[in-house]
């Protein structure tokens, strides 16, 4: 057994992890019983389960449950609330989605009871397959903006969890394509004072925001925060813009942010 130093910042706790965690983008935390947790690197079989969903196909029942989850605001997707909206068969389908690594219960400071989160990699599949019974548009019927501009950006957003877009037409096309995701809160976006459009998935925002807030101190820039939190600089910028939009941080001077 090894003891780890606990760091307290802004009413949050952070534990110092062994060196083998340095290359990990995420870890797994298993609640065993009150006061006891198991922390580990992602298990190989879980990593395989949570592999790229590109090319994967979901059943009509799985698509229906995924869309039902999307229709519920992220903060209200607690297991209790979701359980009330699903039938017995749908609950079995949800359990299968969890086994496939397409859905998980996310817990954090803001979501102590846990909320259901749809993995970023699933969204391209949802858009491709659509809702049961919904006709999918043919590729050649898409307008010029929805083709070359939106599709690459949408794929990149699903892959890395954030986007910084400088072109207004591309931003408009992406916004149209992600209208359903933005309405449900699965994706959030805002326009910065620099004229760029910053878009992040809810999953990426929840993973990054607490670490970014803890690293802000009395004021810091995206590059410094990215170095200490091990997130990409553009990802940090995108999250900072969303935090500024919600009033959790302020831009003290150009490029330098501080917690409110």
Image (cartoon, rainbow, N blue to C red):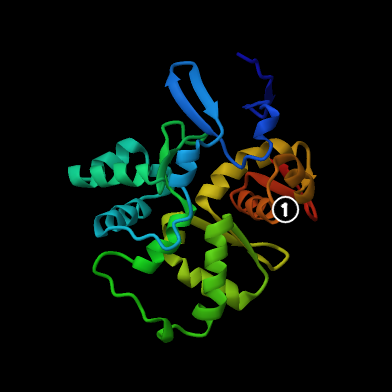
Task: Quarter of the image for the N terminus: give it.
Answer: top right
Residue at 48% over, 50% down: 51
Residue at 56% over, 49% down: 204
Name the side, left or right, on which 175 lies relative to 247: left
Residue 257 image offset from top left, x and y in percent: 74, 47
- Judged from this view, the residue extending furthest toward the left is 88
Vertical placement of 135 versus 191: above or below?
A: below
Vertical placement of 113 versus 153: above or below?
A: above
Q: What is the count of numbered marks?
A: 1
The quadrant holding residue 153 is bottom right
Q: Nearer the viewer, residue 174 or 23?
A: 23
Task: Quarter of the image for the C terminus: give it.
Answer: top right
Q: Nearer the viewer, residue 149 or 95?
A: 95
Label 1 belongs to which residue? 233
Residue 187 image offset from top left, x and y in percent: 50, 57
Residue at 38% over, 62% down: 126
Vertical placement of 159 versus 140: above or below?
A: above
Name the side, left or right, on which 222 lies relative to 159: right
Vertical placement of 138 versus 244: above or below?
A: below
The residue carrying pointer 1 sits among few (fewer than 14), some (14 to 19) or many (20 or more) residues within 10 Å by Cα, namely some
Residue at 62% over, 48% down: 243
Residue 40 image offset from top left, x and y in percent: 55, 29
Q: Secondary structure at mark 1?
A: helix
Residue 24 image offset from top left, x and y in percent: 63, 39
């Amino acid at each position: 057994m090894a003891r780890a130093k606990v760091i307290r910042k802004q009413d949050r706790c952070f534990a110092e992890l062994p060196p083998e965690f340095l290359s990990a983008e995420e870890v797994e935390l298993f609640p065993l019983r009150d006061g006891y947790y198991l922390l580990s690197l992602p298990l190989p079989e879980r990593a395989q389960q949570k592999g790229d969903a590109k090319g994967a196909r979901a059943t009509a029942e799985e698509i229906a449950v995924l869309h039902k989850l999307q229709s519920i605001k992220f903060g209200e997707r607690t297991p209790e609330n979701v359980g009330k909206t699903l039938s017995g068969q749908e609950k079995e389908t949800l359990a299968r989605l969890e086994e496939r690594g397409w859905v998980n219960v996310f817990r954090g400071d803001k979501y102590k009871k846990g909320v259901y989160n749809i993995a970023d990699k699933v969204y391209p599949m949802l858009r491709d397959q659509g809702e049961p019974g919904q006709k999918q548009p043919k590729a050649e019927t898409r307008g010029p903006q929805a083709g070359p501009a939106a599709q690459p950006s949408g794929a990149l957003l699903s892959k890395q969890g954030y986007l910084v877009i400088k072109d207004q037409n591309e931003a408009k096309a992406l916004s149209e394509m992600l209208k359903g995701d933005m309405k449900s809160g699965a994706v959030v976006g805002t326009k910065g004072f620099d004229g760029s459009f910053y878009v992040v998935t809810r999953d990426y925002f929840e993973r990054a925001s607490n670490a970014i807030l803890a690293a802000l101190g009395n004021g810091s820039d995206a590059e410094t925060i990215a170095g200490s939190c091990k997130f990409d600089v553009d990802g940090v910028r995108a999250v900072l813009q969303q935090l500024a939009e919600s009033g959790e941080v302020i831009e003290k001077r150009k490029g330098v942010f501080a917690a409110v």
